[in-house]
Image (cartoon, rainbow, N blue to C red):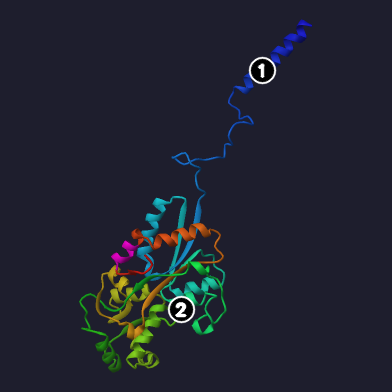
């Protein structure tokens, strides 16, 4: 009997020691719970994919860094290219949470509220309707290399000299917004792009950064780019196109319907309309429209 009692007491002592050894019991909090420095539950990390016009490269990169500092749980992954290229990639199913276009046309092509007469010829319906905004306005300028070797003075001067073949102009492809604005300028002056191309008076770039590089490296006499790209590249602008010449240069932005992070995408889009982001946009020549 005494031997049995001793064994029972020994097992009881063993279990008591095990319970005090630090092993989690059913009443302990789950080890997977994490908290922020303030004691609140930490937010899950989110990756937002942002497709944006090439002319937004410098500004959005800076804004994205500031946003990540304030919201470390959100990682912004930017793809910069011509709006036409980005629109095609989205239409073909490329993952994208937010789209920022350098012209309404490419946004309209994805917007189900638009009909075929307003660019939506493919019947696409990929934009989250209540998120679309006109975010920024830019200007189209005639930029020249350092020192302006060809001595170009204005769009009027460019028109005359394109006709006599004494200048070499860089412009965007037809599917690039800056190219489409340039086509309108040529048409406003009564110039025919096909004729100018045939006599070697113009060359092309697949996005505004390519055109800017051609001008900066003096591979051409001048180029039609955005005011913000001329500013970022340190290029002189000898003239600015009016709205009558090429229309307003509006940058729309929207969240895509297929986003898996709607709340976070809406929050970043709202941040782009706020004072911090607007100050960055304005510092390089954009006019914020959605403050």
Q: Residue drawn 43% across and 83% down?
A: 174
Q: Is residue 283 magenta?
A: yes
Which secondary structure lies at badge 2? helix
Mark 2, residues whose alpha carbon is within 10 Å: few (<14), some, or many (≥20)?
many
Q: Is residue 248 magenta?
A: no
Q: Could you tell whether 86 is left or right of 67 in the image?
A: right
- In x, y percent, where is residue 145? 25, 76
Q: Residue drawn 42% across and 78% down?
A: 176
Q: Residue drawn 29% across and 69% down?
A: 285
Q: Could you tell whether 12 is left or right of 269 in the image?
A: right
- In x, y percent, where is residue 82? 43, 73
- In x, y percent, where is residue 53? 41, 70
| Quarter of the rendering occupied by the C terminus | bottom left
- In x, y percent, where is residue 205? 39, 78
Task: Relative to 287, say whether 166 is above or below.
Answer: below
Disc on res. 14: 1
**Alpha carbon distance from label 1 to label 2:** 76 Å
User: Do residues under tags 1 and 2 come within 8 Å of each other at their CB atoms?
Assistant: no
| Quarter of the rendering occupied by the N terminus | top right
- First in sequence, mark 1 or 2: give its number: 1
| Disc 2 target residue | 105
> Tag count in the figure?
2
Give, as a single range, the part of the protein colored magenta. Answer: 278-284
- Note whether residue 15 is visible: yes
Mark 1, residues whose alpha carbon is within 10 Å: few (<14), some, or many (≥20)?
few
- Note whether residue 220 is visible: no
Work out which residue is located at the far top of the displayed protein and give it.
2
Which secondary structure lies at badge 1? helix
């Amino acid at each position: 009997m005494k031997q049995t009692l001793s064994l029972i007491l020994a097992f009881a002592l063993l279990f008591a020691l095990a319970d005090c050894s630090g092993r989690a019991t059913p009443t302990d909090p789950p080890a997977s719970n994490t908290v922020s420095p303030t004691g609140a539950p930490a937010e899950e990390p989110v990756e937002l994919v942002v497709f944006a016009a090439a002319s937004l490269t410098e500004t959005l990169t800076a804004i994205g860094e500031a946003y990540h500092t304030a919201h470390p749980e959100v990682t912004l992954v930017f793809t910069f290219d011509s709006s036409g290229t980005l629109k095609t990639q989205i239409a073909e199913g490329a993952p994208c949470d937010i789209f920022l276009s350098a012209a309404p046309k490419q946004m309209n092509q994805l917007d189900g509220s638009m009909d075929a007469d307003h660019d939506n010829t493919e019947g696409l319906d990929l934009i989250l309707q209540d998120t679309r905004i006109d975010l920024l306005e830019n200007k189209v300028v005639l930029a020249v290399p350092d020192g302006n070797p060809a001595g170009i003075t204005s769009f009027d001067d460019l028109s005359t000299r394109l006709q006599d073949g004494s200048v070499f102009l860089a412009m965007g492809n037809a599917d690039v917004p800056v190219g489409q604005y340039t086509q309108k300028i040529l048409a406003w002056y009564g110039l025919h792009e096909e004729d100018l191309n045939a006599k070697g008076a113009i060359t092309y770039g697949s996005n505004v950064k390519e055109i800017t590089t051609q001008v900066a490296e003096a591979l051409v006499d001048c180029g039609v780019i955005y005011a913000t790209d001329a500013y970022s590249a340190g290029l002189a602008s000898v003239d600015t196109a009016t709205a009558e010449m090429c229309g307003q240069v509006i940058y729309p932005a929207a969240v895509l319907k297929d986003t898996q992070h709607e709340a976070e995408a809406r929050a970043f889009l709202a941040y782009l309309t706020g004072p911090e982001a607007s100050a960055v946009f304005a510092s390089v020549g954009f006019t914020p429209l959605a403050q």
